[in-house]
Image (cartoon, grey):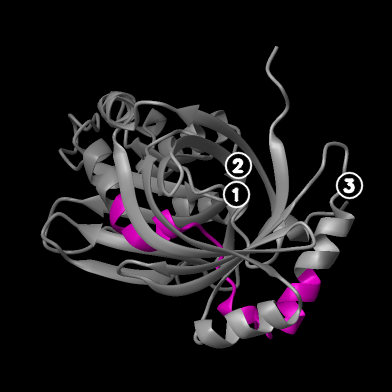
Amino acid sequence: MSAPPRRNVELKATDPDPERSLEVCLGLGAEDRGILRQRDTYFRVPSGRLKLREEEPGGATLVQYDRVDAAEARESRYRLVPISDPAETRAALEAALGTLAVVDKERHLLLWKGVRIHLDAVAGLGSFIELEGVADDGSNLLGELERVTQLTQALEIAPERILRSSYSDQAVGADALVDAARAVMARAHAPYSGFSVGAALRADDGSIHAGANVENAAYPQGQCAEASAIGALVAAGRTRVTEAAVIAAGAEVCVPCGGCRQRLREFMDLDGVIHLCSTSGAHEQVTLQDLLPRSFGPEYLPG
């Protein structure tokens, strides 16, 4: 029987002044543990995130973690597996799952009262600060949250600087979502209309779930791509959508029908981003609010 996952309370934010951040941390008495150089290879998985970390000095570790994407300090549950042959492990995982993104960074590590402070310079993305309050077994996480909050205040991290998602999501942007929608569009079952559609949804743990339209000889029994993607998302155990993409062939972008806009409303905040795409390269970015103004949602139901 495997051990339960480790836990921490985590917050990640952009860092406009890394030198000041270092000065503040040292002034608080943080222990300077030096510079680490890391390469994280993220793989495509149906739930949570999986990455192979190769680190100098150090070694290689396979990291699986689940963390809700939110612009606040939140719990992360993770497992660490030491890897003796990172090259072969990377090749096997890439063949089986596919690579989502590769993130290279230089990490300045400091420790303060059980909190790991990461001052990160991420290739192609910029400078960030990450706070990880590492929890002991049985902790209710209140102490870890309090210490992360203390550091957040001392470092004057404004709410608008806090990131919802991981470096991998920052690195790939909407590309991975659109690529997933495009790939599944090719497998649509549309023998009657000839109009193939693909949809992809990013869940609140960063995982991507895709679906295509499925037509039926009894026309009303057909299913839109967005509905197929929602079914895949729910089947994977997720219930929140943070971002979506829809694509079809043609010169104009594909726009969800009225029914699918309401379907998305069940699982997505009104400020959630939807990418309207076409195989011609056309791409528009809108919010669910733009597509469904003055809408009805679960919050209007009693109880």
The residue under the point 41% across, 63% down is 106
The x, y position of residue 196, in whole percent, is: 21, 41
Q: Give the residues drawn in magenta, as a range.
A: 149-176
Q: According to the image, label 1 marks what residue?
A: 240
Q: Residue 136 or 42: which is nearer the viewer?
A: 136
Label 2 element class: strand
Instruction: State whether the magenta stretch is mostly helix, strand or loop.
Output: helix
The residue under the point 52% across, 80% down is 15
Residues at badges 1 and 3 in contact (C-beta under 8 Å)? no
Residue 264 visible in this rendered orientation of the protein? yes
Q: Earlier in the sequence, mark 1 or mark 3?
A: 3
The x, y position of residue 163, in whole percent, is: 55, 68
The quadrant in which residue 149 appears is bottom right
Name the amino acid type tagged 3: Asn
Residues at badges 3 and 2 in contact (C-beta under 8 Å)? no
Q: Residue 183 or 108: which is nearer the viewer?
A: 108
**Residue 294 in magenta stretch:** no
The residue under the point 51% across, 82% down is 18
Q: According to the image, label 3 marks what residue?
A: 140
Q: According to the image, label 2 marks what residue?
A: 66
Dot in front, 3 or 2: 3
Name the amino acid type tagged 1: Arg
Pointer 3 local density, CA inside 10 Å: few below 14, some 14–19, many at least 20: few
Residue 80 sits above or below residue 226 on the image = above
The x, y position of residue 83, in whole percent, is: 44, 28
Q: Earlier in the sequence, mark 3 or mark 2?
A: 2
Residue 265 relative to residue 284: left or right: right
Dot in front, 1 or 3: 3
Q: Residue 224 or 218: which is nearer the viewer?
A: 224
Pointer 2 local density, CA inside 10 Å: few below 14, some 14–19, many at least 20: many
* Spatial CA span between label 2 and label 1: 14 Å
Q: Earlier in the sequence, mark 2 or mark 1?
A: 2
